[in-house]
Image (cartoon, rainbow, N blue to C red):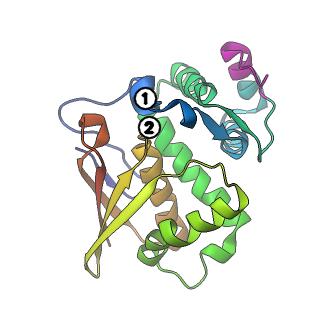
Amino acid sequence: MRYVEGEREFVLGASKERSSITDILIRCEEKDDVMKGMVFTMLSEMIEERFGYETWDELIEQTEPDSEGIYVASAVYPHEELIAYVGAISEKTSLSPTKIVFNFGHYMLGRFADIHPEYFHNHTLKSFIQSVHDVIHVEVKKLHPDAVLPHFDYVDESADTLTVLYRSPRQLCALAEGLISGASEHFGTPVQFHHPVCMHDGADHCRIELTFK
């Protein structure tokens, strides 16, 4: 179980912190064993901004990716390269892989807002989250037909709550939470997370319960 308030803390459940690389970035099907280059270019931007250009070069040298660390946003690259980078970053910073993936999601949302501000117009935080599956993902598929995207369902029971049901063969729920955290910052709306059901515990989906403040 996880509980997060905005971007200020990331506390994993009482039982254990899911910190193994293969658990956080699990690869379930061979056909899903690639990721878009845009993911890698954004990761390099985040590392360079926060730790300096030399740190990104050190990560490439340490992980020795087949791509040699050269990424084209529209191309696809082995998923294992992202796993290796997250592991190397964890070793350098002492942050858990979960926290790194969460922080990356938060960063990605900010970059996405810079690149595609039109997707944020006339939205609240809640309505933006609800637009992800049926609007944003549809547009992403038009631009990148081979993109492997998670599936979201929503349970909307009150004005200040929203439950997100997340399904993905990659089980990157920490990334999804980071993206929501970044959206919370973008819209200036604090949000609390409660994560009582998780794919990493054997469930077929993650249940992320949001409360807007």
Q: Assess whether residue 197 is covered by the magenta stretch.
A: no
**Image coords of residue 10 (percent x, y):** 36, 44
For the residues labelled 1 and 2, say whether their Cβ atoms are less than 8 Å apart: yes
What residue sits 39% from the left and 67% below the top? 190
**Image coords of residue 101 (percent x, y):** 49, 39
What amino acid is at disc 2? Lys
Q: Secondary structure at mark 1?
A: loop
Query: For mark 1, does the 10 Å Cα neighbourhood hold few (<14), some (14 to 19), or many (20 or more) residues?
Result: many
Q: Pick the quarter of the image with the N terminus.
A: top left
Residue that mark 1 sits on: 96
Q: Pick the quarter of the image with the C terminus.
A: bottom left
**Image coords of residue 63 (percent x, y):** 66, 16
User: 156 above or below 177?
Assistant: below
Q: Residue furthest bottom?
A: 122
What is the CA distance from the residue labelled 1 to the residue labelled 2?
5 Å
Q: Residue furthest front?
A: 31
Q: Quadrant of residue 114?
A: bottom right
What residue sits 18% from the left and 35% below the top? 14
User: 37 above or below 4?
Assistant: above
Q: Assess whether residue 67 is covered by the magenta stretch.
A: yes
Residue that mark 2 sits on: 99
**Image coords of residue 122 (percent x, y):** 56, 85
Q: Nearer the viewer, residue 88 or 10?
A: 88
What residue sits 61% from the left and 26% below the top? 85
Q: Secondary structure at mark 2?
A: helix
Decide if residue 159 is on the left or right side of residue 96: left
What amino acid is at disc 1? Ser
Query: For mark 2, does the 10 Å Cα neighbourhood hold few (<14), some (14 to 19), or many (20 or more) residues?
Result: many
Q: Which residues are magenta?
A: 58-69
Q: Quadrant of residue 26?
A: top left
Q: Nearer the viewer, residue 71 or 90?
A: 71
What residue sits 27% from the left and 46% below the top? 2
